[in-house]
Image (cartoon, rainbow, N blue to C red):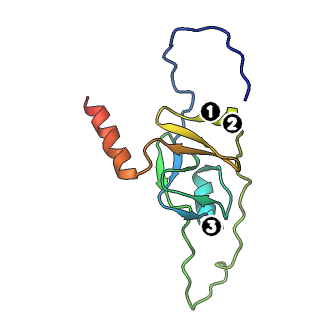
């Protein structure tokens, strides 16, 4: 990385530019097309099928303003009965892939950008959903 320092500036409280919430993975595993197909109706995805995710990882943008804990690894239930429309393949829109600058610009105060040699991921600072909920309740009480 290379940078050029210009000057120190006073910290300014900037309002959040993002008005939408995010989809947060509930569990660790590989994403499935079946689960992502149901999620894409409620927002825009950041991952594609077959990607390893973990609890607390951001997998998409919610169309509403609240964060939503989802299961992108959900498998289709198998049964012995076949129905006419159940064997349709999932039609997924391509995921929104962001580079480092776009990721850093996108995150909120309670989120981080995770950079590895193979990928750039978005995640919550507190990965566990229950701990994240308790932390937000404690902040609202203070």
Q: Which residue is mark 3?
A: 32
Indicate the quadrant containing the C terminus: top left, top right, bottom left or bottom right: top left
Q: Position of residue 134 (x, y in %)?
A: 31, 44
Residue 73 vs residue 37, the one in the foreground: 73
Q: Position of residue 2 (x, y in %)?
A: 74, 25
Distance CA(mark 1)–CA(mark 2): 6 Å
Q: Which residue is mark 2?
A: 100
SS of the residue at dot 3? loop
**For this view, does 92 lie left or right of residue 40?**
right
Q: Nearer the viewer, mark 3 or mark 1?
A: 1
Q: Position of residue 122 (x, y in %)?
A: 58, 44
**For this view, does 3 lie left or right of residue 11?**
right
N-term mark: 2 or 3 = 3
Q: Which residue is mark 1?
A: 104
Question: What residue is shown at x 62% (from left), y 55% (from top)?
Answer: 40
Distance CA(mark 2)–CA(mark 3): 25 Å
Residue 65 vs residue 5, the one in the foreground: 5
Q: Position of residue 55 (x, y in %)?
A: 48, 55
Residue 1 vs residue 44, the one in the foreground: 1
Pointer 1 local density, CA inside 10 Å: few below 14, some 14–19, many at least 20: some
Residue 111 vs residue 2, the one in the foreground: 2
Find residue 138 and report its image quarter. Answer: top left
């Amino acid at each position: 990385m290379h940078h050029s320092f210009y000057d120190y500036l006073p910290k300014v409280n900037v309002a959040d530019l993002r008005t939408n919430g995010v989809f947060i993975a509930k569990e660790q595993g590989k994403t499935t097309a079946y689960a992502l197909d149901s999620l894409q109706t409620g927002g825009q995805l950041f991952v594609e099928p077959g990607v390893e995710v973990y609890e607390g990882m951001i997998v998409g943008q919610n169309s509403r303003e609240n964060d939503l804990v989802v299961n992108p690894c959900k498998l289709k239930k198998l049964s012995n009965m076949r129905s006419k429309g159940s064997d349709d393949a999932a039609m997924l829109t391509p995921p929104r892939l962001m580079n480092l600058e776009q990721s850093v610009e996108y995150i909120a105060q309670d989120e981080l950008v995770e950079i590895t040699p193979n990928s750039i991921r978005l995640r919550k600072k507190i990965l566990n959903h229950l701990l994240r909920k308790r932390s937000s309740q404690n902040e609202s009480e203070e």
